[in-house]
Amino acid sequence: MTTSPKAQVSEPATDPREIAARGAAVELRDVAHRFGALEVIANIDLTIGAGEVVGLVGPSGCGKSTLLELIGGLREPLRGEITVAGVDEAPHRLDRAAHMPQRDLLLPWLTAIDNAALAPRNRGASKREARELAAPLFKRFGLAGFESTRPAQLSGGMRQRVAFLRTLLADKPLLLLDEPFASLDAITRSEMQEWLAQALAVEPATAIVVTHDVEEALYLCDRVAVLSARPARVLGTVRSPAPRQRPRRETVTSPEFATVRERALELLSA
């Protein structure tokens, strides 16, 4: 039975009963931030349940990446409270979040597997132990045979896969993905969206995905928060009709997906 479009949309927050059942992994209460006289974030309230994948979409320059930095402990908000896995101070939030920036930032002198295994190495694992942790993920995520390859010899999509594995191997309760496919061409980007959807199904995680692409957000995420132009506020949240459950083409061409996408675009245009 197809859920009605009205039931797909929640403004401005998700059902609190669902959050209570899952347990909150991330909570933002009245969060605001500015750079000097420039107000970037204004009065944001948002709750993300454990195991939920939430997208942040909004106009260019509205503060999406800044909001991600605030959540991940790279900055403290000017006002308001942010908790990640029950802690609120920036150093503790940083310790509980793994960041995947727009650029893959792979180290050119390391092999693919050693790039992916950086986090275990930083935690004190030997090179052999770190590689043993990374090796099963290379096979699981279609990188088998490329363990000893240098980043310069990998395609853009493969580099992003390695970067995502490095994020997973950080072993943090929260993944923060900042426009992970922005630098890829359209065909590779579509392929990577489907790959990431499968990866999140195989390795379930609480994640926040920043993107300017509404279709990408709705395909990858359980729920999408639509932000206003700067200073960013949550205009509303839209629930995806079938996140990560079907092949991308089948999902994004379905009538229910089109209805929810139009609703998200309406919020953006407002």
Image: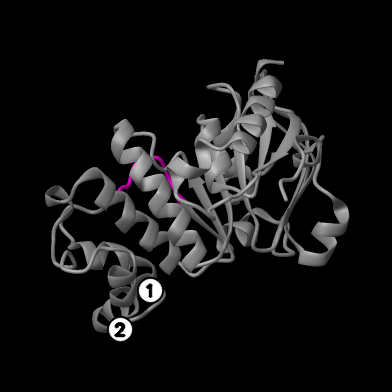
Residue furthest to the right: 17
- Left/right placement of residue 212 relative to residue 267 reads left
Tag 1: amino acid: Pro
Q: Is residue 222 above or below residue 147?
A: above
* Residue pictured at 49% horizontal, 68% vertical: 203
Q: Quadrant of residue 62?
A: top right
Above or below — where is 212 with respect to 53? above
Closer-to-camera residue (98/240): 240
Depth check, front residue: 219 or 26: 219
Is residue 264 in view?
A: yes
Q: Is residue 231 among the parts visible in the rendering?
A: no
Tell me which label, 2 or 1, sits earlier in the chain: 1
Residue 144 location, quadrant: bottom left
Q: Residue at x 58, y 33 (%)?
A: 64
Residue 24: give x, y in percent of width and height.
Answer: 76, 60
* Residue 240 x %, y %: 64, 43
Does residue 90 lie above or below 111 as drawn? above
Density class for disc 2 (Cα within 10 Å; few <14, some 14-19, many ≥20) is few
Magenta range is 100-105
Quote the CA–CA distance across marks 2 and 1. 8 Å
- Residue hosting label 2: 129
Q: Are circles 2 and 1 on residues that touch, CB within 8 Å?
A: yes
Tell me, yes or no, whether the highlighted magenta stretch contains residue 102. Answer: yes
Residue type at mark 2: give it. Answer: Glu
Q: Residue drawn 71% across and 37% down?
A: 238
* Mark 1 lies on residue: 120
- The residue lying at 61 percent from left, 34 percent from top is 255
- The majority secondary structure of the magenta stretch comes to loop
